Image (cartoon, helix red, strand yellow):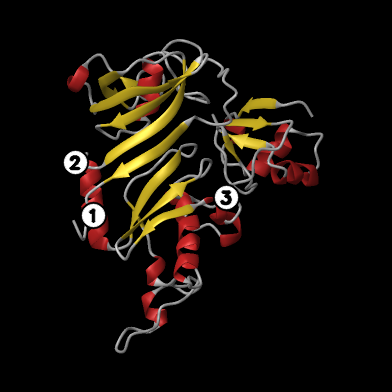
Amino acid sequence: MPPRTIHLAAEHNGLTLAAALKRLLPDHSWSQVRKLLAARRVQVNGNLALDGERKVRSGDVVKILDHSLAPPASAESVRLVYVDEYLLVVQKPAGVTTLRHREETDLPQRRKQLQPTLDELVQRVLAEHLGISPDAKPKRQPGSAPKSARRPRGKPSADRRLKIRPVHRLDRDTSGLMVFARTPAAEQKLVRMFARHEVQRAYVAVVHGHALAQTIDTWLVRDRGDGLRGSTSQGESAEEAQRAITHIRPMEQLANHTIIECRLETGRTHQIRVHLSEIGHPLCGEKLYTHPPGKPPQDDTSGAPRQALHSAELAFIHPATN
């Protein structure tokens, strides 16, 4: 079957992905639809989709591919870089979201396992590091409430040593260093450090063209006029505008591309991707920020399998030991 791109209409709103595909492909049986999903040949909004029971909405973009995509990340692809009783640092692989969306938190385990999130994988890695079962239950302390009083039936209580607390995020297709807190106190201090821009972060990226050393200092808004994030000419007077500062240093010039280092002074959503696109050097593999407002999207010609952005350096004061 040749590849197809379909924009879902109002009639598809609220359907399961499998039901939408069956309606879009009337010549396919339910078995053939399930095989398409299992073969990793379906994307929704640019992301691999394996869960046929997920709900879709009008406006979603469904792609049916003529080839299989890479399988989802596994615990084996997550590397534990540092761990102590207060926090841990991991190398995040590309292609996995940091956290599960709120509406997916109560999904059955079998559906979560189709496409695990980073925090779920990290718990597995941490369990192996500590030599305990990821499904281990904590010992009941004398005088504590019985299990039935502490949690709803059917929801096992995992070992408290495996509890991790996210304090920042990386985009699904960005790889590299991430820190998680292991105690409430460490979580609060790390969140404050990120909010105050006290965490030093450096990324390595591959961009189109020959990028020069420079500092990009703009005010970012959620909607630049076409639904995408972008810089505003109104500066800080714009509604909900946030200052964003990125320092760029070329590391290596290639024929038609540049390997660069990006150091963040602030950490806004999609900051690097937006800034690089706005100076005319979008990331190789970029699918979203490819064009100025009012212009049609541009195809990426680099051949990169995903956005070429890696969190290479993370430096902070330890929240417990200083």
The CA span between labels 1 and 2 is: 15 Å
The CA span between labels 1 and 3 is: 32 Å
Q: Are there few (<14), some (14-19), or many (20+) residues within 10 Å of tag 3?
A: many
**What amino acid does circle 1 point to?**
His
- Which callout, 1 or 3, points at the residue further toward the start of the chain? 3
Residue at the spot 54% in from the left edge and 52% down from the top edge:
116
From the viewer's perspective, is 198 left or right of 42? left
SS class, disc 1: loop
Give the residue furthest to the front: 252
Relative image position of residue 319 (x, y in whole percent): 22, 56
Relative image position of residue 265 (x, y in whole percent): 24, 32
Q: CB under 8 Å between callouts 1 and 2? A: no
Q: Determine which residue is flagged by label 3.
A: 115
Picture quarter with the N terminus: top right
Residue at the spot 65% in from the left edge and 30% down from the top edge:
63
Q: Determine which residue is flagged by label 1.
A: 318
SS class, disc 2: loop
Q: In which quadrant of the rendered view does residue 241 lie?
A: top left
- Which callout, 3 or 2, points at the residue further toward the start of the chain? 3
User: From the viewer's perspective, is residue 314 above or below residue 160?
Assistant: above
Q: CB under 8 Å between callouts 3 and 2? A: no
Q: Which mark is residue 246?
A: none
SS class, disc 3: loop
User: From the viewer's perspective, is residue 279 above or below residue 13?
Assistant: above
Q: Nearer the viewer, residue 206 or 271?
A: 206
Q: Determine which residue is flagged by label 2.
A: 196
Image depth: mark 1 or mark 3 in front: 1
Relative image position of residue 231 (x, y in whole percent): 30, 19
User: From the viewer's perspective, is residue 206 above or below residue 44?
Assistant: above
- Which callout, 1 or 2, points at the residue further toward the start of the chain? 2
Q: Nearer the viewer, residue 97 or 261?
A: 261
Q: In which quadrant of the rendered view does residue 165 lie?
A: bottom left
